[in-house]
Amino acid sequence: MHEELNNFTRNEVWTLETKPKGARVDRTKWVFRNKQDDEGNIVKNKAKLVANGYSQVEEIDFEETFAPVARLEAIWFFLQYAIHHDMKLYKMDVKSAFLNRYINRYRIIICTHLDP
């Protein structure tokens, strides 16, 4: 939980404010899961603070949303191209990448309980 909150602070994701009069407030909840190794041993406990977006109304609270995902054919093409040209490939994980998206149109107000 501390790592998640530190990511929010470091990336300037939110500011602490008093609720404006008449503003609708979305709730949040903590989602917990255990990361396991190949043998099923728990290697890390993970926590994410998520907004309960199911109460939002399209075109009032948000526009069309999607997650950019490459098609399998594009991934295969990229791998074949890299192999053909004897290129080195690296794998990486971008922690908290979603926190870096700037939302310039909407102001989202959430109520969070920092203790689960």
Image: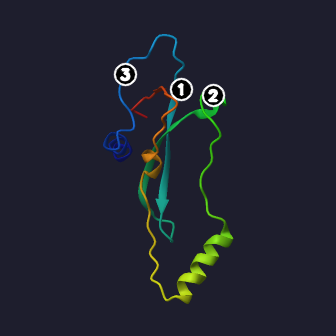
Kind of residue at disc 3:
Glu
Left or right of 21 on screen, residue 9: left
> Hey, which quadrant is residue 8 in on the image?
top left
Where is residue 55 shown, x and y percent of the image?
63, 28
Q: CA distance from mark 2 to mark 3?
A: 21 Å
Distance CA(mark 2)–CA(mark 1): 7 Å
Give the camera-side residue of 2 and 23. 23
**Kind of residue indicated by mark 2:** Ser
Residue that appears at 39% across and 32% down: 114
Image position of 109 with respect to 37: above or below: above
Residue drawn at the location 45% of the way across and 52% of the way down: 97
Q: Secondary structure at mark 3?
A: loop
Which residue is the site of mark 1?
A: 26
Of badges 3 and 1, nearer the viewer stands 3
Q: Are marks 3 and 1 in contact (CB under 8 Å)?
A: no
Q: Is residue 81 above or below residue 41?
A: below
Residue at image position (52%, 11%) is: 22
Residue 18 pos. (x, y %): 38, 17
- For disc 2, the marked residue is 55
Residue 109, image x, y percentages: 48, 25
State which tag comes first along the sequence, 2 or 1.
1
Q: Residues within 10 Å of mark 1 (few under 14, many from 20)?
A: some
| Residue toward you, 6 or 73 | 73
Residue corresponding to mark 3: 17
Q: Are marks 2 and 1 in contact (CB under 8 Å)?
A: yes
Instruction: Describe residue 44's horizontal placement relative to residue 51 as left or right.
Output: left
| Earlier residue among tags 3 and 1 | 3
